[in-house]
C-alpha cells in the first residue's frame, strides 16, 4: 500500500534504513564470529596434526634404529643393517622424487574436491536458511 503522506513515507523509509542497517550489522557480527570459529578450528587442527607428525617422525626413527640393529644382528654386522635400512629410505626417496608431479597433482585434486564439497555444503545451508526465512515471512 502506497501512502501519499510525506510523514508516513519518511517514517517508513527511516524504519527501513534502520532495519537494514541493523541487519547488516548483525550479519557482519555473525561473519566475524564464524571467521573466529574457523580460525580457532584451523589452529587447533594444525596443532594436533603438528604433534602427530612429530610423534610419527620419532616412531619411524626409533623403528628404523630397531630394524637396523635387528638386520645387523641377523647379518652379524650392525653397519650392514644400518646400510640396508638407509638404502631402503634412499630408494623410497628416489621413487617419491620421480613420482612427485603425480603425487602433487593427486593432493591438489583432493584439496579442490574437499573445497568443492565444503562450498556445496555451505550453499545448501544458505538455501535452507533462506527457505526458513521465506517461510517465516509468509506466516
Image (cartoon, helix red, strand yellow):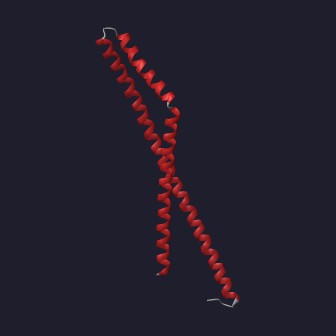
Quadrant for the N terminus, please. bottom right
Going 66% across and 87% down the picture, which residue do you hit? 8
Q: Residue 53: percent from the left, percent from the top? A: 43, 34
Q: Residue 21: percent from the left, percent from the top? A: 62, 70
Q: Residue furthest top?
A: 76
Residue 10 sits above or below residue 113 on the image: below
Q: Residue 55: percent from the left, percent from the top? A: 40, 32
Front residue of 71/138: it is 71
Residue 65 sits above or below residue 44 on the image: above
Residue 101 sits above or below residue 113 on the image: above
Q: Residue furthest left?
A: 74
Q: Residue furthest right?
A: 6
Going 52% across and 39% down the picture, which residue do you hit? 105
Front residue of 63/25: it is 63
Count of numbered circles in the view: 0
Going 46% across and 40% down the picture, which residue do you hit? 47
Going 50% across and 36% down the picture, which residue do you hit? 102
Amino acid at each position: 500500500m502506497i501512502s501519499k503522506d510525506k510523514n508516513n513515507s519518511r517514517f517508513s523509509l527511516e524504519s527501513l534504513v534502520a532495519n537494514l542497517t541493523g541487519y547488516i550489522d548483525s550479519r557482519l557480527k555473525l561473519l566475524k564470529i564464524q571467521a573466529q570459529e574457523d580460525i580457532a578450528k584451523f589452529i587447533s587442527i594444525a596443532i594436533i596434526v603438528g604433534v602427530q607428525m612429530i610423534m610419527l617422525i620419532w616412531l619411524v626413527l626409533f623403528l628404523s634404529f630397531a630394524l637396523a640393529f635387528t638386520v645387523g644382528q641377523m647379518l652379524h654386522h650392525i653397519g650392514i643393517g644400518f646400510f640396508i635400512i638407509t638404502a631402503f629410505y634412499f630408494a623410497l626417496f628416489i621413487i617419491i622424487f620421480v613420482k612427485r608431479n603425480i603425487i602433487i597433482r593427486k593432493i591438489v585434486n583432493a584439496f579442490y574436491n574437499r573445497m568443492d564439497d565444503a562450498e556445496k555444503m555451505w550453499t545448501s545451508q544458505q538455501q535452507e536458511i533462506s527457505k526458513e526465512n521465506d517461510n517465516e515471512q509468509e506466516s
